Amino acid sequence: GPQDIAFVLSAGTDLDFVEVGGAALLDDEIVRIDAFDPATLSGTLARGCVDTVPASHAAGARLWFLDDETALDPTEYAPSVTVQARLLTQTGEGQLDPALAAVDSLLTAQRQGRPYPPGLFRIGGASYPASVAGDVVLSWTHRDRLLQADQLIDTAQGSIGPESGTTYSARLLRADTQAVLASQTGIAGTTATLSTTYVGEVIAELWSVRDGLDSHQRWRHTFAHAI
């Protein structure tokens, strides 16, 4: 789940090169490696780093350890452009024929300029509660895309920043119809109270906004609401 930090790999390659304190990609979530033993293939993670929030992952999800050899494309692309690439393997027998390589596509979305999502998301002071009665009180901590550019700050740390011009938006949805029950925008602080008379499964969402751009990911938790 989104709070789990321990992991055990079933297999891997070049695991002797894994660096504690380095970044890894777990599905679409960026994590920090806080401990790793290549002999037992076990370790611990810090969750929700950079512009991502903690998420649930299925057993067998692939964990990519990142290093300084990541390829870069110096080309500048406009928003909403589909960029295609082919990854060519290199072996002792030569490089894969580009015509045989699969095409990977990516839709540009201004990710580098979007504000980081808030950290330390709580509902009624709790992490991921199963139920809430009465007002739904959300709380969180600030994040700063610029101040954190050279750091892997996880979601559990206190406030950093916020980046100038950042506000927060929150809303409460019916889980069955996605109808909005309550919402707030333009929040400068780190709390919001959402009220509704609806009884049943609801979804709380929280995200950052700056210069018309929403954070790349948002917090989203489903729970039972009662009066």
Image (cartoon, rainbow, N blue to C red):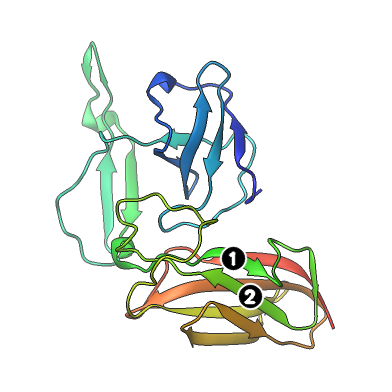
Specify few, some or many for label 2: CA neighbours under 10 Å numbering under 14, 14-19, or 20 or more: many
* Residue 23, quarter of the rendered image: top left
User: What is the quadrant of the C terminus in the image?
Assistant: bottom right
Specify few, some or many for label 1: CA neighbours under 10 Å numbering under 14, 14-19, or 20 or more: many
In the drawing, what numbered circle is on residue 173?
none
Question: Could you tell me residue 144's position as x and y percent?
Answer: 37, 66
Tell me if 34 is positioned left or right of 89 in this view. right
Tell me if 14 is positioned left or right of 100 in this view. right
* Residue under pointer 2: 138
Residue furthest toward the top? Answer: 92
Q: N-terminal of the two: label 1 or label 2?
A: 1
Question: Could you tell me residue 40's position as x and y percent?
Answer: 58, 19
Marks 1 and 2 close (CB-CB < 8 Å):
yes
Res. 178 in view: no
Residue sitting at 53 percent across and 49 percent down? 47
* Label 1: element kind: strand
Residue sitting at 41 percent across and 38 percent down? 21
* Residue 65, quarter of the rendered image: top left
Question: Amino acid under label 2?
Answer: Leu
Relative depth, front residue between 144 and 57: 144
Res. 16 in view: yes
Question: Amino acid under label 1?
Answer: Phe
Q: How many numbered callouts?
A: 2
In the drawing, what numbered circle is on residue 121?
1
Relative depth, front residue between 145 and 221: 145
Depicted 43 relative to depicted 108: above or below: above
* Label 2: element kind: strand
Relative depth, front residue between 218 and 158: 158
